């Protein structure tokens, strides 16, 4: 049985983190889920990187839709009305996760997705760093290959000679960075 994970916008927006997470999804280790609202949040957040940020994000979102046409799940407003989270702006994430029978929500936002509240809906919360590190422990070569591909792309696109550990640490994946550094 494939694990189904709803990916929050805060995981999709940083490029390196997104590429590591979706790289693992491409291998079939889990099935990604999101909603159009989550993708829209990513596009709006990308404005922060400059005038072309939103356009670039929308192009990447189009590629995501093409790669995973079944990942986008409809909003569940009828369910949203019955749910509670500390930040009401995140209730749509929980509603889509519940409505699509996800196993987990992947987010960096621990305080607004309390484990006890998620457990009431048979969901767990996972952060990308811990999740990817646990996958590395089970499939080291696979995760190392994904990381090498992400590193090569980062070097090519940025024109900088990134090292693996600094790149992953900057991408808020410090445990994975340490694990990969120890395996080399």
Image (cartoon, rainbow, N blue to C red):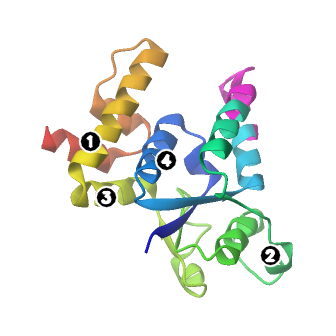
Residue 88 image offset from top left, x and y in percent: 77, 68
Q: Nearer the viewer, residue 87 or 13?
A: 13
Q: Residues within 10 Å of mark 2 (few under 14, many from 20)?
A: some
Q: Which residue in the structure is indicated by mark 3?
A: 135
Viewed as shown, does residue 96 lie left or right of 164? right
Element type where label 4 sits in the image: helix
Q: Is 45 rendered above or below residue 89?
A: above
Residue found 33% across the figure and 38% down from its top: 147
**Quadrant placement of the N terminus:** bottom left
Is there CB contact under 8 Å for labels 2 and 4?
no
Q: Which mark is residue 80?
A: 2
Which of the two discs, 2 and 1, labels the residue nearer the N terminus? Answer: 2
Residue found 73% across the figure and 79% down from its top: 84
Q: Which mark is residue 144?
A: 1
Alpha-carbon span between mark 2 and mark 4: 27 Å
Q: Which residue in the structure is indicated by mark 4?
A: 22
Which of the two discs, 3 and 4, labels the residue nearer the N terminus? Answer: 4
Which of the two discs, 1 and 3, labels the residue nearer the N terminus? Answer: 3
Q: Residues within 10 Å of mark 1 (few under 14, many from 20)?
A: some
Residue 129 image offset from top left, x and y in percent: 39, 53
């Amino acid at each position: 049985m494939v694990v189904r994970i709803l990916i929050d916008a805060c995981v999709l927006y940083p490029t390196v983190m997104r590429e590591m997470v979706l790289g693992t999804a491409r291998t079939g280790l889990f099935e990604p889920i999101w909603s159009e609202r989550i993708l829209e949040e990513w596009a709006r957040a990308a404005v922060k990187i400059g005038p072309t940020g939103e356009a670039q994000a929308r192009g990447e979102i189009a590629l995501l839709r093409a790669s995973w046409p079944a990942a986008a799940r409809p909003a569940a407003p009828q369910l949203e009305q019955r749910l509670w989270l500390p930040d009401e702006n995140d209730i749509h994430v929980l509603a889509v996760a519940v409505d699509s029978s996800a196993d987990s929500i992947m987010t960096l936002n621990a305080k607004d997705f309390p484990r006890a509240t998620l457990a009431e809906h048979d969901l767990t919360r996972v952060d990308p760093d811990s999740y990817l590190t646990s996958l590395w422990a089970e499939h080291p070569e696979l995760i190392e290959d994904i990381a090498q591909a992400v590193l090569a792309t980062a070097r090519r696109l940025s024109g900088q000679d990134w090292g693996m550990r600094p790149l992953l640490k900057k991408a808020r994946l410090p445990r994975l960075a340490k694990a990969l550094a120890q395996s080399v």
